[in-house]
Amino acid sequence: MPLSDLPWWRWRARIRSALHMFSDPVFQRAAWLDGSGGYGDVTDAVYRLVEDTWLDRWSAEKYVGSIFRDSAEAVAVDGAVLRVLRIVHQVGADAPAAAYLGHPDWPEAVRAAREAHHRLAAGDGEDPGLPPCSLAELRRLTAR
């Protein structure tokens, strides 16, 4: 199923981008700890996760049919958002990546993000195992 079949597919693309990055520890080490460019930092990913949607304030269920295909996607996204934001609030905004990745609850946030990422990728008919796209690729994708 194409990503663009949902009314707010650009928001979905940004949320998927963030979830993909939060779900991949190998990517996190390379991009966030070692600093390979083009992907933004943890704060950028948090912003993509909650920016226009206010998923930090209300449930993803509100967006079923516009961003998310069904309640199962919404529940998975809510679980990931809550776990990531809990860590961000405990560590503080704009902390170094190592502070987030070293948090004792980070593995659970990664697991929840992976579940949500896989569910959304499957809903879009895409391979969840591909590496995350760069911010430039995301801009090209959402410029259509």
Image (cartoon, rainbow, N blue to C red):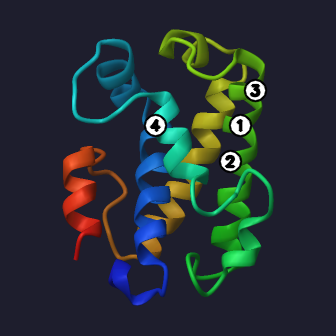
Camera-side residue of 4 and 27:
4
Q: Quadrant of residue 72?
A: bottom right
Quadrant, the N terminus: bottom left
**If you read the primary sequence from the N terminus, does the residue marked by circle 3 or circle 4 appear first?**
4
Q: Which residue in the structure is indicated by mark 3?
A: 89
Assess whether mark 3 and mark 2 are in contact (beta carbons under 8 angstroms).
no
The residue lying at 54 percent from left, 44 percent from top is 47
Q: Amino acid at mark 1?
A: Leu
Q: Nearer the viewer, mark 4 or mark 2?
A: 4
Relative to 9, does residue 87 appear above or below in the rendering? above
Residue 50: where, in percent of width, then height? Answer: 61, 52
Per the rendering, the mark at residue 81 is: 2
Q: Is residue 4 left or right of residue 56?
A: left
Locate residue 67, reporting x and y percent.
55, 76
Q: Position of residue 40 (x, y in %)?
A: 35, 33
Disc 1 is placed on an element classified as: helix
Q: Are marks 2 and 1 in contact (CB under 8 Å)?
A: yes
Q: Label 3 crowding class (10 Å Cα cut-off): few <14, some 14-19, many 20+?
A: few
Instruction: Find the distance from the CA under tag 3 to the CA under tag 1.
Output: 6 Å
Q: Which mark is residue 44?
A: 4
Q: Amino acid at mark 2?
A: Val
> Can you say whether 5 is above or below 62 in the image?
below
Q: What type is the residue that disc 3 sits on? A: His
Q: Which mark is residue 85?
A: 1
